[in-house]
Amino acid sequence: MPAVLFFLVLLGARCSLGQDMSREERHGLRNQVVEMFDHAYQNYMDHAYPADELMPLTCRGRVRGLEPSRGDIDDALGMFSLTLIDTLDTLVLLNKTTEFEAAVRRVLTDVRLDNDIVVSVFETNIRVLGGLLGGHSMAVMLKDKGQHMLWYQDELLHMAKDLGHRLLPAFNTSSGLPYPRVNLRFGVRGPETRTGTETDTCTACAGTMILEFAALSRFTGDPVFEIHARRALDFLWEKRQRNSNLVGTTINIHSGEWVRRDSGVGAGIDSYYEYLLKAYILLGDDLFLQRFNIHYASIMKYISQPPLLLDVHIHKPLLPARTWMDSLLAFFPGLQVLKGDIRPAIETHEMLYQVTKKHNFLPEAFTTDFRVHWAQHPLRPEFAESTYFLYKATGDPYYLEAGRTILDNLNRFARVPCGFAAMKDVRTGSHEDRMDSYFLAEMFKYLFLLFADAEDLPFDVEDYVFTTEAHLLPLSLSTAAHASFFPSNRTFEEELDDSNFDWTCPNTRLLFPDPAYPRILRDSIRSAVDKSCPRPPPYREPGMGHPPLRAQDFMANNAEHLELLRRMGVSLIHLKDGRVQLVQHATQAVSAVTAEDGVRFMQEMMELSSQQQKEQLPPRAIQIVSHPFLGRVVLTAGPAQFGIDLSKSSTGVRGFVTVAEPYSGCTEITNAEYVRGHIALLQRGQCMFAEKARHIQQAGAIGGIVIDDNEGSSSDTAPLFQMAGDGRSTDDITMPLLFLFHKEGNILLEALKEYREAEVLLSDKARDRANIFKVKPLPASVTEGSVDVQVAQEDCLTEATTPSSFEPTEDCLTEATTPTSFEPIGQSETSTLELDQPAAAQVTPSREEASPVERDTSPAEEVGPPEEEEEEESPAEDARPPEGEAAGEESTRPEEERDSEDREEPEGDVDSGSQSADELLADWREDLEAFQQMEKEEL
């Protein structure tokens, strides 16, 4: 058997299934990829280096400890110029050898690894160690060609070995599974080094080490790294569920007990499966292929429900664990291509493509009927990765068009003057001040390879394997001089069974004798996405009595239903404010079956709550369309219960903003000549919202924006709300009125101050800039992306937006609660769900019967008698689960993995230029406390 599995499937005969893209078109798209990379990379170097990552909205670097904490996601940052190291081999692939040589010199001169900082073992391995090894591979390749890097003496490899030794202390556990975090200077010593106290890690975190560690061992001749990585993989294999041959998502690193027993191919597990197959490809050890094939058979038997990939329970694999999918599973069609299983790869990719076209990007999570579950999109590359591999396997130009869609959406919706900004909410088009290093490491590699010809590449990519971070490791490592030092850990139980092997990959011509066959597969899936697929019925064991209670049937005043809840371990608590709280204790259920019924009931209840929230008024968008923003900055705003419904307007309301006088808008407007035909800016407080609207409308305004008077308030730390009326008819108000918190409003005020005028578009969601500027076309440099639009660097304006759902009420303030995440099976965990509904009514989680009235007054103001009540508000319920967790049941999930999760708390501070450093730091501390309090409340 050859030591390396060659990518035969990628070289198979190709079928032309659609209209070919011309060579000129492909080269144009290839060049566009390079231009986009230059835009992202140069802005990182200009505005962020040597910081770990770029903050593209505020045009500055993200320095850990100086920015508000985002929780575990910040563990990827280690003060080691993360983005530069992660980008090294991308520079070579894109033929930027001069820049690569300069970048290597910078890394050797500026980067230090001896930092007293706690980092994620998983992230540091795939991004930094992988980046150094990929850079070393490229440097050696270029040096061997005799034109570049002639001075190179394995310096990057020496740094990689140093880093490898700094990660090794994490493996000092009885199981061999690594601790999730390590201190780069002190290792794992206990609380004094802020390490060694964790007990759990995700499967992907422990199982995604073998490629980098084995490559380091074989490059250096030191076997210690590969030995530890193999030991961790062996332990995970031993702990698989023997009947289903599946692994759970989270495991105790000391006892080996599964903490979370749900199993899928997305967050928490994804790259474990990927590395089993790729370890065989890189190292030539048949054992890895055998293990992968056994796992893969179970995945296709239990998890794959084409085109869906749904998590199941490892002990009861016929029982669905959840009814939504996360975006990280988008890598799986690419892995199926390497496996040679093309049909399901086509089906799942097509489903993902249709979801992408519905929402412009893949939401972080989406339901089985393809609606948004988590609205963020942090510029993940997995869909582009699978698109590239499917094109290589089939040669079908359809996948070139899919790649064009990715490019267009990145330029239209994510591109900002200082780089590319992650999407905070794909529904509104709002941004997040974040550009992760993997965007440069992976996205541009796969897109360039998709459109490039073989002669465009400086080396043959078939001689390398891609790590999960798309770093390039040479296949020649399997025959390295030191390869014999690393014997397989095969036990007597694992003698190779030829029945578990597909020794050759199928030829695509044999798979698809009819050239139209892939198109037929795609058409049926496209139809299913358009019509929304029905959800599969929950599995029920035979002989277990009547079907379990369903969320949509539950009545809180039904005694039989309450008894069924008790049997499922679900308690019902009546809160003082009239809401009902559901809490599940899985250990209190009368049986394992009823406990899982309870898990499903809680999941369905949260799905029902989410559906009802979607029926309420969504947030609105304020898009700054004047120079130099040109539609790239989008602020999320709260709507009013009166005035024009922007969701029914195809164009929205567009105009220049002006500050009303008086600023409160509570009396007749004295600068009506400036307000007329403009959108008036108003300050919250002193009178009702509807009264403000009437005054500016009387002055001739075409719209209004109310800015919160509570300094420091932000949609990142407070739920948005709908502005209520004044208790009487508001039919006379015929213009839109939107609400911004103080920080978001300050962005608009600073733009007005800096540029003298600011034009905005009020709409239900962010609009495509091409549509905004139909009347007045964008400059060619903007539409073509060849020239960057510059924003003043001293006061770079950020946007702070929070996707929210809204609870409309009549002239009152409604307390809003968000269904929280829960862990259904763990012995010590409980599942909690608060429902805004009196117990005597049918439980519909997002409704509320009685609502207290709150005045809209500044803290220092005198509160008048009831007949002089001021503005009333209805806060919006944030429909997102806590970021950093899996909705429904992932509150215990570690945040190590970017490949395996990476869901962070929102941020969005504004550097206004007028605040002192002390004031800014004070604001950040307040934000951090607010974030932590939000997490506690949601958990």
Image: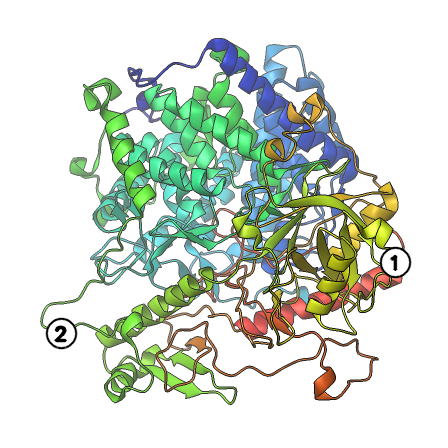
Residue 159's spot in the image, x, y percent? 66, 37
Q: Is residue 11 above or below residue 631?
A: above
Amino acid marked by disc 2: Met
Q: Is residue 115 left or right of residue 536?
A: right
Q: Residue 841, relative to residue 438: is it above or below?
A: below
Camera sees residue 266: yes
Crowd around label 1: few <14 · some 14–19 · many ≥20 (10 Å)? few
What residue is drawn where x is 50% and y is 70%? 818
Instruction: Kindly indicate the quadrant of the structure image that contains residue 544.
Output: bottom left
Give the vertical position of 635 relative to 894 (above or below): above
- Res 716 label: none
- Circle 2 is placed at which residue position? 544
Which image quarter holds the N terminus?
Answer: top left
- The image quarter containing residue 689 is bottom right
**Could you tell whether 926 is left or right of 12 in the image?**
right
Residue linked to disc 1? 917
Q: What residue sits 76% from the left and 40% below the top?
A: 48
In the rendered structure, which amino acid carries the disc numbered 1? Ala
Residue situated in front as seen by the camera: 426 or 756: 756
